[in-house]
Amino acid sequence: MTVHAFVDESRRGSYLLKQRCQRLVLESRGPSDDHRDARTLAAALAPAPSASGLVYEHLRPYEDPLLWIPDAVSWCYGAGGDWRRRVSPLVERVTDLGAVEQTP
């Protein structure tokens, strides 16, 4: 899920605040996307982002092993069969984004 979809789903950041999140780690997708994420989060936490106490940072998967978990779970779920059965207890919700076109 992109940070934009997460913020939209959580009603402009209120979920993060209600849960009293102190740290949010996002997988880095490059400078342009990381900057867009930062703008989205700043707008979601407005008018006083610093008052929320939330610190967010972009990391590469090798910098935080917890970033591996969603990749592994989503791969297993997508593989289907016994792999999907094994990870099903970990999956709360699946959002079908439809056909995704890849640009060459």
Image: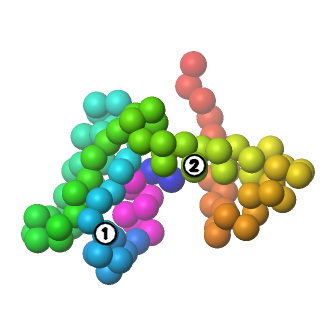
Magenta residues, dominant SS class: helix
Residue at 17%, 67% in the rendered image = 53
Residue 4 magenta-drawn? yes
Q: Quadrant of the C terminus?
A: top right
- Are dots 2 and 1 in contact, CB under 8 Å? no
How many numbered dots are placed on residues in this image? 2
Of the two numbered discs 2 and 1 on the same chain, state the one appearing first in sequence.
1
- In this rendering, would 15 be left or right of 102? left
Image quadrant of residue 68? top right
Residue at 80%, 44% in the rendered image = 79
Residue span colored magenta: 3-9
Residue 51 magenta-drawn? no
- In this rendering, would 59 be left or right of 89? left
Q: Position of residue 49 (x, y in %)?
A: 14, 65
- Label 2, on which residue? 69
Q: Position of residue 9 (x, y in %)?
A: 44, 69
Q: Is residue 29 visible?
A: no
In this view, the residue farthest toward the right is 81
